[in-house]
Amino acid sequence: MQRLQTTSLRVADNQLFILDQQALPQEKRWLDASTVEALVGHIHALRVRGAPLIGLSASLLLALLAENGLSRDQLATALETLRASRPTAVNLMNNLDRMKQALWQEDFIPALVAEALRLIDEDKRLCDAIAQAGSQLVKPGSRLLTHCNTGGLATAGVGTALGVIALAHQQGNVSNVWVDETRPLLQGGRLTAWELGELGVPYQLITDSMAASLMAKGQVDAVWVGADRIAANGDVANKIGTYSLAVLAKFHGIPFYVAAPQTTLDPACPNGEAIPIEQRDAREVTGVAGSFGAVQWAPENAQVYNPAFDVTPAALISGWVLDSGVVLPEDVQRGIFGGSAV
């Protein structure tokens, strides 16, 4: 496969490397992800994360494994192992469905390579289209609030919600971005703050619990988030803490927008209740670990509930910003995502 480089993925010498998103922002470290076991480990540890990026990394790995001599049956097994690595983000399933079709073509090796590269190029175009559509909704002088990380680190392109914010800033319409820290793993504090700084977008980092007071003081003009899965009725699964922001935004009369590519739609999923929600390691909540060592602040026997995602009902969403354009609540009620009326 040709050399390839995105913000978080690199292909060189027929090996796949991922940017370690657990090391950012202190260190920019590339890790080998050239085996199924290695990539699954990186996905579980969130060293590679973001719904679009997870799907793209799995697709690239399958193409590289094919070029490196794995049989069709071995690749089929690898594909299903990768599919099971994160159950909530539907981009992974959608991308692997396309790779599976390529796998069963007669000349499956070039077919897999072509499909993986096609998915990368498509994601870049999808991100650009989302940014163009969403930036039209950002009014001059806007103070925007975002949650988790939805920039180039999570995609092959400029990002989803953060791509919208970046373009709107270039157009002179963003005065400040409130960045939720996004507990418990702090993707907002570690990743989004870093990306906005690199882009020159003015921001202020806040703890998740500060959003309500900002809204009450009239300091937030709109909320922008991404999505890991959009059900047929418009319900959205996204990083834990998104639902509470949507409830707060509704109470305070603030627009709440979801930015996502077509690969995040799941017309086979009727509603949010049918979306599988990943439960993560209790240690993410009871303490913290990193290059500095480990600290535990909770009692050793503390019982923990740690869902990675929550579901925001369609009734709380002002607009779904896709690469195809802006979808409004009345469009969803007409079944544009493949579901019945909300």
Image: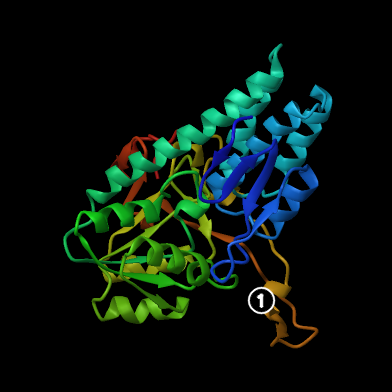
Q: Position of residue 114 (x, y in %)?
A: 59, 23
Up-down relation of residue 285 to residue 315 (above or below): below
- Tell me residue 182's x, y (percent): 51, 70
Image point 69% across, 64% down: which residue? 280
Quarter holding residue 287: bottom right
Q: Is residue 302 left or right of residue 59?
A: right
Residue hosting label 1: 285
Identify the amino acid type marked 1.
Answer: Val
Mark 1 secondary-structure assignment: helix
**Between residues 122 and 98, which one lies in front from this camera angle?**
122
Residue 241 visible to an observer of this rendering: yes
Q: Please state the horizontal and vertical placement of residue 98, each as a whole percent of the image.
A: 60, 27
Picture residue at 77% right of the left edge, 50% below the top: 38
Tell which residue pokes out farthest to the front in this image: 13
Q: Quadrant of residue 306?
A: bottom right
Does any portion of residue 101 appear in the rendered image? Answer: no
Disc 1 residue crowd, few under 14, some 14–19, many 20+, Cα 10 Å = some
